Amino acid sequence: MTVLRGTFRYWDSILAVIAASAAALWLPKEIIKEITPELIAFFTIQSAVILPAMIFTAGLLRGDGLTVAEIDRYQAALRKQMIFWVTLLFLDLIAVAFLVLGKAADWTWKITIIGPHSGEFGWVLIWVTVVLSALAILRMIPFVRGVMSQLELNALLAKKAIEARGRETGTPEPPPSTFDRPEGFGRIVGPKRRAQS
């Protein structure tokens, strides 16, 4: 049971290692050369998406209507979320750095030891690059879940703030109003034809 729980928890790392091992064994260098610019562009866009999420997380917690215990609990959860954002951002940056390095080195890394012995270690560059890239891509799934959880938390904090203001002013919260749909609401209207003169 513990092994299954650990496997489920680190599923992205396991898949990244498997993908990197397969790439180091069978992926031709020419394919990596062709897709390197696209990967760099993808990770750049991903980093640009992460930064607003980090700023939103830092300013999400408000004290209206919360107890000290609730603030401590929410702060601990948001700190974990921020650590995840920062880790994902660094994965993007390091993956881009290895992509640039691999492209500059033509995905070859020849090491010569004392004497006539030498070895080709370009597969190490490929392995590390694919591990970082796969982790950054696979962790977009928990990234989306994190954004959705922050949406729920933001709604909860807004409700608590409204309830706190109602208790301070002594005015009860108004019941939710209904929206009366006018006739033809939601109907698709086609373009009007011009009257022929």
Image (tube, rainbow, N blue to C red):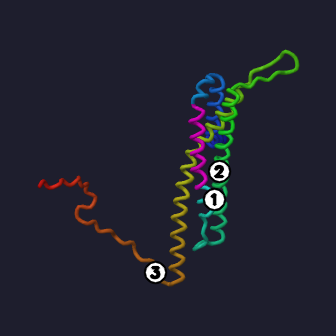
Of the image marks 3 and 2, the number of the one nearer the N terminus: 2
| Residue receiving disc 1 | 78
- Figure disc tally: 3
Identify the residue shown where x is 53% and y is 78%: 165
Identify the residue shown where x is 55% and y is 54%: 147
- SS of the residue under disc 2: helix
Q: Above or below — where is 135 with respect to 61?
A: above
Inspect the image, locate mark 3, and give the three-letter code of the amino acid beneath it: Pro
- SS of the residue under disc 3: loop
| Residue receiving disc 2 | 84
Q: Quadrant of residue 3?
A: top right
Q: Quadrant of the N terminus?
A: top right
Label 1 and label 2: CA atoms lie apart by 10 Å
Instruction: Give the camera-side residue of 196 and 35.
Output: 196
Identify the residue shown where x is 54% and y is 76%: 164
Residue that extends furthest to the bottom in the rendered view of this protein: 170
Q: Above or below — where is 61 with respect to 143?
A: below
Q: Is residue 177 left or right of residue 132?
A: left
Of the image marks 3 and 1, the number of the one nearer the N terminus: 1
Q: Quadrant of the C terminus?
A: bottom left
- On residue 170, the disc is none
Q: Residues within 10 Å of mark 2 (few under 14, many from 20)?
A: some
Q: Residues within 10 Å of mark 1 (few under 14, many from 20)?
A: some
Residue that extends furthest to the left in the rendered view of this protein: 197
At which x and y percent is residue 116?
A: 84, 15
As for residue 182 lying within the magenta part, the answer is no
| Residue receiving disc 3 | 172
Instruction: Give the camera-side residue of 53 and 36.
Output: 36
Magenta residues, as a range?
Answer: 35-52
